[in-house]
Image (tube, rainbow, N blue to C red):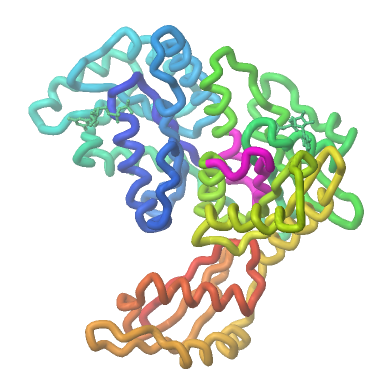
Amino acid sequence: MSNIIAIVGRPNVGKSTLFNRLTESRKAIVDDFSGVTRDRHYGVSEWTDKQFTVIDTGGYVANSEDVFEAAIREQVVIAIEEATVLIFMVDVTTGITDLDDDIAQLLRRSKKPVFTVVNKVDNTALENEASVFYGFGLGEIYTISSMTGSGTGELLDDVITHFEDVPLEENALPKLTIVGRPNVGKSSLINALIGKDRNIVTPIAGTTRDSIHIHYNQFGHEFMFIDTAGLRKKTKVKENIEFYSVMRTIKALEEADVVILMIDAEEGMESQDVNIFHLAEKNKKGIVILVNKWDLIEKNNQTTKVFEEEIRKRLQPFTDIPILFTSVVNKQRIFQAVETALQVFQNRSKKVPTSKLNDVMLPIIEKYPPPSSKGKYIKIKYVTQINATSPMFAFFCNLPQYIKEPYKRFIENKLRENFDFNGVPIQIYFRQK
Ligand code: GDP
Ligand code: GDP
């Protein structure tokens, strides 16, 4: 079940400003460390406990004159197909333009909810001018200022009513998905693992299914592959190939428990790969990295080590991730990749008994207590793992607000050293007791 907001609209209406507003605050908390996400046009956000992905479609169109109107129109069509909710953004200072009208025409045919958002309404005087946008015939309009944030709360209150809570499936089979940039070898890997069986699940053209679920049951392993590779659409506009593949990736990723991220050995870990990695991490998915096409690399006895270090550097601070070097064409380590992914699934489902957790962690905490802050002495009394789909720990203490990020990292590292959470994001909370 994915919850995706796509922000559509012509250039300069303020799409990326809203996008940043919706994703930034969270980003500041989650990846205060990285400067690699500049070319990122999608991100995770949340509003009153509902989590969702936001896509700024504008990021995928080059500003070259002739392709661009066609590209924007095509994006809107893709967004209508793929998103849960569409935000159609227009600009109060320009009124309705021809391209706005074209987009509105496409959106009127959408079966998905469309929110017409009139941006740059920075003051109440501009409110009145927004009423011309009722002319689209798309129902209610929302006036906001992406710059100041005014009106965005009311908008989100209504948008999230269209989202569904992710259902917790008990005893369901592990769900794995393979993601990565085009041509990295995703389809080849699925074919190598599934072989001819894949034909059975070929979807019928024109169906609205998001993904194909392939039941794998061989060599003592049983799981589901969430596959979207075979659903790749033909597009006339090359910028939209990436946009489309990003949409598919996000959906597959949200459905999966464990994400197998394939990167191309010849190209190394690129910023797009890092973005997918962070998306998986923020969605609390298990992660395995495959460096594929390893057969094409000239090797000596240091090569693997050097590659691995290079990749881990880019994953910081979450580096406790299995990295395998594969060649799908030579069938090298592809079954090991599956086994590793299933191990990560186990790690993600693991529940450490409270007594064991305290036996291990309390002596460590006693030896290395949180540094006192403003003369306050912080005492951690006990820890328990919270029942959730991915590992989450609550440490109960007298003054949770004084515990700083470095100590939290220290605790996370100790949890990882003592209990195997390889490949799994873990959440740590300090609570008052
Ligand atoms: P995009 O091309 O649709 O992504 O638009 P941008 O987010 O890049 O914004 C285009 C311009 O409009 C930038 O100069 C923004 O600073 C400005 N802008 C965005 N939102 C607002 C707003 O709420 N009020 C005002 N006055 N300007 C805005
Ligand atoms: P996808 O777009 O990620 O699904 O990538 P494909 O599976 O279609 O593969 C793209 C190209 O890379 C194809 O020509 C594959 O034969 C080739 N390829 C895939 N895996 C490997 C590999 O491990 N080594 C080499 N040399 N080529 C590979």
| Vertical position of residue 366 compared to residue 217: above or below | below
Side (left or right) of 298 relative to 424: right
Q: Name which quarter of the figure residue 170 lies in.
A: bottom right
Side (left or right) of 106 relative to 194: left
Residue occupying image coordinates x 76% and y 49%: 299
Spot occupied by residue 66 in the image (x, y as percentages of width and height): 43, 7
Which part of the image, by quadrant, shows the N terminus?
A: top right
Front residue of 85 and 366? 366
Ligand 2: which quarter?
top right
Q: Name which quarter of the figure residue 388 lies in.
A: bottom right
| Residue interval drawn in magenta | 248-270
Residue occupying image coordinates x 74% and y 42%: 297
Spot occupied by residue 234 in the image (x, y as percentages of width and height): 64, 17
| Vertical position of residue 398 compared to residue 340: above or below | below
Side (left or right) of 427 relative to 373: right
Q: Is residue 365 at least partly visible in the picture?
A: yes
Spot occupied by residue 233 in the image (x, y as percentages of width and height): 64, 21
Q: Name which quarter of the figure residue 313 lies in.
A: bottom right
Spot occupied by residue 345 in the image (x, y as percentages of width and height): 70, 60
Would you say residue 252 sits in the magenta stretch? yes
| Vertical position of residue 197 compared to residue 391: above or below | above
Q: Is residue 172 at least partly visible in the picture?
A: no
Which part of the image, by quadrant, shows the C terminus?
A: bottom left
Q: Residue furthest left?
A: 125
Residue occupying image coordinates x 24% and y 22%: 91
Side (left or right) of 112 relative to 180: left
